[in-house]
Image (cartoon, rainbow, N blue to C red):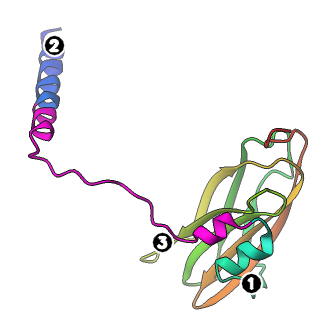
């Protein structure tokens, strides 16, 4: 019991010291901001415009991109998606949902030989085609998969 009490007092003391140092201006404060990349793509209202904005209008279909999503999503609010590729030197992966009001769902930059794998969730109001676009070596490839939505996630 005594050891637990001492541990809590030490942690509180350390937290207080950090708070005082921050209040006194001894710790530098930096605003966290996201990079404003592909703002035009995220604002696009059609898949073609979104693809053009991210420089993928000339993408070629590839069997080396695998999209894993449920074939039927019972609820369109949280649909899991996983994308992997065996294309060497993948630099980015973008996701688009064809029938969403803003089709560009996400864009991931890969650096320093990062594994070309993403796992996230998305929202869809109706059955739609999901497109994964991979950029590697100045070229773009894509793969598609249809996801059937039984209960809409965008207010449906």
Q: How many C-alpha atoms fall within 10 Å of the one at disc 2: few (<14), some, or many (≥20)?
A: few
Q: Name the residue under label 1.
A: 57
Q: Position of residue 155 (x, y in %)?
A: 81, 38
- Figure disc tally: 3
Is residue 129 left or right of 122 when viewed as pictured?
A: right
Q: In the image as oriented, which residue stretches furthest toward the top?
A: 1
* Residue at x 26% of width, y 54% of height: 30
Q: Which of 29 and 130 is in front in this view?
A: 29
Residue 16 left/right relative to 82: left
**Marks 3 and 2, the one that precedes in the sequence:** 2
C-alpha distance separating marks 3 and 2: 44 Å
SS label for mark 3: loop
Q: Is residue 135 above or below residue 138?
A: above
Task: Residue at 31%, 53% (x, y): give it.
Answer: 31
On screen, residue 116 versus residue 19, left or right, reads right
Q: Earlier in the sequence, mark 2 or mark 1?
A: 2
Task: Please tell me whether residue 135 belongs to the stretch shown in magenta.
Answer: no
Is disc 1 surrounded by few (<14), some (14 to 19) or many (20+) residues within 10 Å?
some
* Residue 96 screen position, x and y as percent: 73, 65
Q: Which mark is residue 5?
A: 2
User: Is 32 rendered above or below residue 37?
Assistant: above
Q: Give the range drawn in magenta.
A: 17-44
């Amino acid at each position: 019991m005594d050891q637990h009490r001492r541990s809590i007092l030490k942690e509180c003391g350390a937290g207080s010291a950090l708070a005082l140092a921050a209040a006194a201006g001894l710790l530098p404060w930096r605003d966290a901001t996201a990079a404003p990349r592909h703002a035009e793509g995220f604002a696009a209202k059609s898949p073609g415009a979104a693809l053009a904005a991210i420089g993928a209008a000339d993408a070629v279909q590839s069997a080396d991109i695998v999209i894993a999503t449920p074939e039927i999503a019972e609820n369109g609010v949280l649909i899991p998606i996983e994308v992997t590729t065996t294309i060497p030197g993948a630099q980015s992966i973008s996701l688009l949902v064809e029938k969403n009001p803003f089709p560009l769902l996400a864009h991931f930059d890969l650096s320093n030989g990062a594994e070309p794998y993403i796992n996230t969730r998305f929202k869809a109001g109706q059955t739609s085609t999901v497109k994964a676009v991979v950029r590697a070596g100045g070229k773009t490839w894509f793969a598609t998969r249809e996801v059937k939505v039984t209960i809409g996630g965008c207010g449906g």
